[in-house]
Amino acid sequence: MLNKLQAVASRYEELCFKSQQPDFYADPKLAARLLREKSDLEPIVEAYQDYNRACRDMEDAQELMGDPDMKELCQETFADARDRRDALYEKLQILLLPKDPNDEKSVIVEIRGGVGGEESALFAHSLFRMYSMYAAAKGWTVELMNYSETELGGVKEADFILNGRGAYSRMKYESGVHRVQRVPETESGGRVHTSTATVAVLPEMEEVDVQLNPADIEMQVYRASGAGGQHVNKTSSAVRLIHRPSGIVVACQEERSQVQNREKCMRMLASKLYEIEKERQSSEVTGLRRSQVGTGMRNERIRTYNFPQGRVTDHRIGLTLYRIDAVMDGDLDELINALATADQAEKLKSAQN
């Protein structure tokens, strides 16, 4: 590992030198790519420097330990430096784990009401609100693609893009079945009901990322419905794309023009096809499609929101938080940080075996 760290440090120094040259920005795309690489390497290099500093502190303390007057102080210094070194070694192991190439991408999120009728649609709306507030806290933008409401303000389905660097690295842990236990607004007897909604999170792909044959895609246009202004019922601006080989259907009606809606549909279709291919390759490698932290299958219950008890439980890692109001208002970092840590630990365990 130390040889690899030295190579990373050398590459980082090379990138620092290049970024200071007068002609560095002559090729803006190349400059952006190199600066992104430099930014990615920086936390590894900083941790490696701290690790080397701790090793030197250990050596210095050991050299002075022969002096009787300094022995006790040097022993304390040595123990402190050793603890720092060991902690940094573990941190570096995690930093060197291969990263998901899609982690920096924006994401497409699909929310669907599940079991529970109108209450499931109302819960789906609560999840849409939760993710919108989380996105706002992260400085991401929400771009609607398809949004279908019920008469009581619930959501039959909501498809939207969260635009922001690193959105997939955080949101990928949200795919799966979310369960709610609460007294529905439609319940007059005060009984607690259990309902579900499904969430799917895909890294946003461009058409260039996935091979798409135009002959395989059927395009249908129709009049948009629901919120969006008076134009929605006057023109056939909504677009539905059908990918014949896979049977995938995507739709978008939130933009005013067919061109804009089709462009969004193509991005969504590319993302879905990419996900199918990734799952196929993973299935071939593992021999079966099994659920792990961060890569849970979409039909697996991942989290329960229990309103009467004020708790949220993530079943993948056994974490329960008693602050459901804050979570529903988009305060998801504690949950997602815990899931990311568990994911890293699982990957580190696999890498060591």
Image (cartoon, rainbow, N blue to C red):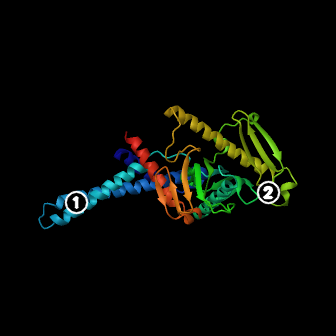
Instruction: Answer whether residue 10 is visible to the viewer in this image.
Output: no
Residue type for callout 2: Gly
Q: Residue furthest bottom?
A: 69
Q: Residue furthest front?
A: 189
Instruction: Find disc 2 in the rendering and name its residue.
Output: 226
Instruction: Please name the residue that numbered disc 1 is placed on.
Output: 60
**Residue at the extreme right of the image, as rendered:** 234
Query: Could you give the CA–CA distance between mark 1 and mark 2, rounded to whole angstroms?
Result: 71 Å
Q: Quadrant of the N terminus?
A: top left
- Percent of width and height locating residue 36: 53, 53
Mark 1 or 2, nearer chain start? 1
Q: Which of 37/212 is in front? A: 212
Local crowd size for mark 1, using a 10 Å CA cut-off: few (<14), some (14–19), many (≥20): some
Quarter assignment of residue 271? top right
**Circle 1 — which element?**
helix
Q: Position of residue 312 (x, y in %)?
A: 52, 59
The quadrant of the picture occupied by the C terminus is top left
Task: Return the x and y of residue 134 as percentages of the image width and height.
Answer: 59, 61
Q: Is residue 18 above or below residue 247?
A: below
Residue pictured at 76% horizontal, 34% vertical: 215
Q: Badge 2 local density, few (<14 within 10 Å), some, or many (20+)?
A: some
Q: Is residue 176 visible?
A: yes
Q: In x, y percent, where is residue 198?
A: 62, 49
